[in-house]
Amino acid sequence: MNKLELLRTFVRVTELSSFTQAGESLGLPRSTVSEHVQALEELLGARLLQRTTRKVQATQDGRVLYERSKDLLSHMEELEGLFRQAEAQLSGRIRVDMPTVMARELILPRLPEFMDAHPLIELEISSSDRQVDLIAEGFDCVLRVGAQPDQTVVARKVCSMPMVNCVSPVYLQRYGSPMTLADLAQHQLVHYVRPLGSRSAGFEYQQGNKVHRVPMAGRVTVNSTDAYQAACLGGFGITQVPLLGIRELLARGELVSVLPDYPAPPLDVSLLYAGQRHLPQRVRVFMEWLAATLQAQL
C-alpha cells in the first residue's frame, strides 16, 4: 500500500477530526479511510488517533506525525512538479471558497481560460456568506472580503472594492433623497450585522484616512448579502454595498445612488491560505490567476 497515500489520509482525518468528512474531502469511502489509518498505525507501531463516539483527535504520537507529514507531503508535491516541462501539466484538486457575488460576476465567467490552460486540474468551488474554517474544512485557499481577524492563516491583500450608498425608487418616493449627513436623522438604514444580535456600526463614511460613523434608525436588520440587497429593493432603507454587486441594478434604475460624497471605506479583498511552506504549485498558480483576474476587473 502506498505510504504517501496513507499519510495523506491520516492528515485529512486529523485536520477534520472525522473519518467521514476526510473521506468526502479525498473522494474515498469511510471504510477505506479507516483502513488507511489502521494500516499506518500498524506500520509505525503506534496509536495515532483517539476515537470516540463524537470526535476523532490525534494522540501525542499522532500530533508529532501530523506536523512531520505536512512537511513531507509538501516537499513531495514540489518534487513531483520539479521536472514538469510546462505549467499545463499541473494536476490535482483545488478546493476554494469565495463570496457568491464575486464568484458569479468575476471569477466563473473567466474560469474557462484557467481550466483550458490547466486541463489536469480539478476545482471544488464553495460560495457562501459565512466565514469558512480554511484548515478544518480542507480549503486550499479562500477569497474573503473585509477585515481578517484570523491570525492562524496568511492573508494576502489582492485589491479593494469601492462602495456606494443606494436606495430604491420606492424609498425615494416615501422619504425623499438625503442631501447632507444631517438629513440622515430623517432616514432609515438597513442594518447589516454578523451575527444577529450584534450592534450595527450605523452609516459609515470615509474622509481622508479617517472613518466616521453616524448612528441611524432602521427597522430591518439582516445578516446575509442577499437579504441586504432584497431589503434595499423593498424600500426599507439605505444600504452601503460594493459597487460590484449592484452595477446592473443602478444601470436599470432599480437602485439609485445617494450621498456620493460620503462613501463607506473600500473593502479589502484578500486571499487566505495556510502558509507558504505547504502550498502546492497548482494552488500557487491558481492563486496568481485569481489575483490577476480580480485586479483586472476591480
Image: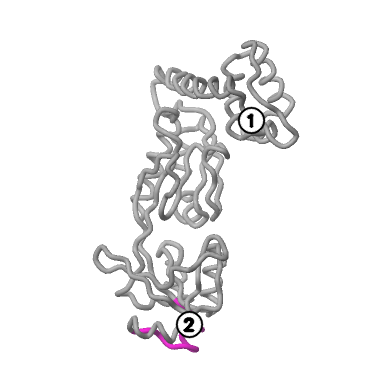
Of all residues, the one furthest to the left in this rendering is: 208
- Return the residue nearer the eye: 236 or 289: 236
- Residue that carries the numbered disc 1 in the rendered image: 57
Instruction: Give the camera-side residue of 187 and 285.
Output: 187
Residue shown at the point (52%, 21%) measured from the top left: 69
Asked if the stretch drawn in magenta spans residue 270, the answer is no
Q: Is residue 170 magenta?
A: yes
Q: Which is more foreground, mark 2 or mark 1?
A: 1
Which three-letter amino acid code belongs to the residue tagged 1? Gln
The magenta region covers 167-179
Which is nearer the eye, 173 or 251? 173
Relative to 205, 4 lies left or right: right
- Upstream in the sequence, badge 2 or badge 1? 1
Judged from this view, the residue extending furthest toward the front is 60
Label at residue 169: 2
Q: Cα distance, mark 2 to mark 1?
A: 55 Å
Residue 159: which disc?
Answer: none
Find residue 161 and report its horizontal and vertical position in percent: 37, 58
Name the quadrant of the C terminus: bottom left
The amino acid type found where label 2 is placed reads: Pro
Label 1 SS: strand
Q: Is residue 15 above or below residue 227?
A: above
User: From the image, which quarter does the N terminus lie in?
Assistant: top right
What residue is rendered at 50% in x and 55% in y? 104
Give how far across and how far down residue 52 sits, in percent. Answer: 73, 31
Packing grade of label 1 (10 A; few <14, some 14-19, many >=20) is some
Q: Is residue 160 left or right of residue 51?
A: left
Q: Quadrant of residue 53?
A: top right
Mark 2: few/some/many CA within 10 Å (<14, 14-19, 20+): some
- Image coordinates of residue 146 in percent, x first then y, are 41, 55
